[in-house]
Image (tube, rainbow, N blue to C red):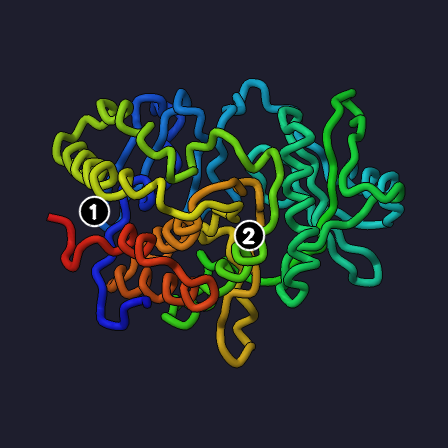
Amino acid sequence: MLRESPLTLHLPSCWLADSTTGGGEGEDRCRKVVQVADEYTLTASLTSETGILWRRFRGQKGNSGRVSPMISEARSPLPVSPDEAVQLARSLYGLEMSARSLPGEYDSNFHLISADGRAFVLKVMHSSRDREFIDMQCAALTHLAHRVPELALSRVQLTRLGETFAKACLRNGDERFVWLLSFLPGRVLAEVRPHTPELLRSLGRLLGQIDLALQNFSHPAAIRALKWDLAQAEWIRKYLFHIEDPSRRTMIERVLERYESQVVPQLPTLRKSVIYGDANDYNVLVNSPSAPSREVVSVIDFGDMHHGLVVAEPAVAAAYALLGKSEPLAAAAALVEGFHGVFPLEETELSVLFPWSGPFH
């Protein structure tokens, strides 16, 4: 069972680490790998050579980490205009819409609204995105719509030809995959305060419901080399020399050693299945402040889905939940409790989350 007494949560560095933006124009971001605020709030600026894109949080919307292959900014396609999004909605879906650009890392996203108030999200994918990657997301969302229809997740909208996504030729001659989702109202968790224990438990519950429903889902694209897969976390060691501050480097080395000694031996015993995998605070939607109680109602962006460790889901979400908290371990424990109540974690999985009863030393 999940322990009821106060817990000190230990997560390996890669479970707590997350990428942040680099500095200004003059800064060489390829020289910076890991920055650490403290041992409970580990953040990372990962080099471009690692194959990981930048993940931004705290005041910056819509930028989440992506994994190999790295998309070079020099090869990024020209942005798609709202006018072209309107044309795509008309030609592919038979919809007359207005369009407003939404934040996006490398794909072009648009909030579409019809005269009668219907709302959608049109996604025009980066030219490097392959068919299987998009098909995996569409298939997973369709699967979830049938298995857990009560969850307020985005619904894939079919094209006029009955397809879940289509390839379209843009005005500049580029061919891009396009798909359409129902729009989800809500406010991202990063912009909501306070993060009460019940709010964090509701996030854990939602993630547990999603991953439980994905237990019998499979897709070839879900089995992939992904640096956000916590079972593949040891790649970080060869980049530690980039950390110039010896005390910070030592901190990361210490946590990595614990990962290798406490977690790696347990990997063969930990359950694996397809997981959502990216509950960062800009992917989590919270209901209206006018609701009787604030709770998490949905998540967006299924692009980091992969066949990975079940326990990685609450671990990643907990890493975000504890950021900036006066009682970080209580926040993380509330989230794990919510997940555990829906999708019970095994004792071995809990031992990976809670290997000690005291903080790092």
Residue 203 appears in the picture as rendered: no
Task: Report the residue marked by disc 1.
Answer: 38
Q: Is 103 situated left or right of 248 in this image? A: right
Element at label 1: loop
Residue 240 locus on image (x, y percent): 24, 27
> Does residue 324 sit above or below 88 in this rendering?
below
Residue 40 appears in the picture as rendered: yes
Given residues 76 and 176, the one toward you in this image is 176
**Residue 238, label in figure:** none
Mark 2: amino acid: Gln
Which of disc 1 and disc 2 is earlier in sequence? 1
**Residue 215, label in figure:** 2
Q: Give the residue displayed 19% in from the left and 26% down from the top.
A: 244
Identify the image quadrant of residue 328. bottom left
Q: Residues within 10 Å of mark 2 (few under 14, many from 20)?
A: few
Mark 1: amino acid: Asp
Identify the image quadrant of residue 234. top left
- Quarter that holds the N terminus: bottom left
Element at label 2: helix
Q: Give the residue displayed 58% in from the left and 33% down from the top.
A: 106
Q: Residue furthest bottom?
A: 292
**Callout 2 touching callout 1 (CB < 8 Å):** no
> Does residue 259 sit above or below 359 in this rendering?
above
Identify the image quadrant of residue 33. top left
Q: Is 282 situated left or right of 81 in this image? A: left
> Does residue 10 sit above or below 101 in this rendering?
below
Q: Residue furthest left?
A: 361
Residue 128 locus on image (x, y percent): 63, 24
Q: Give the residue displayed 39% in from the left and 24% down from the top.
A: 50
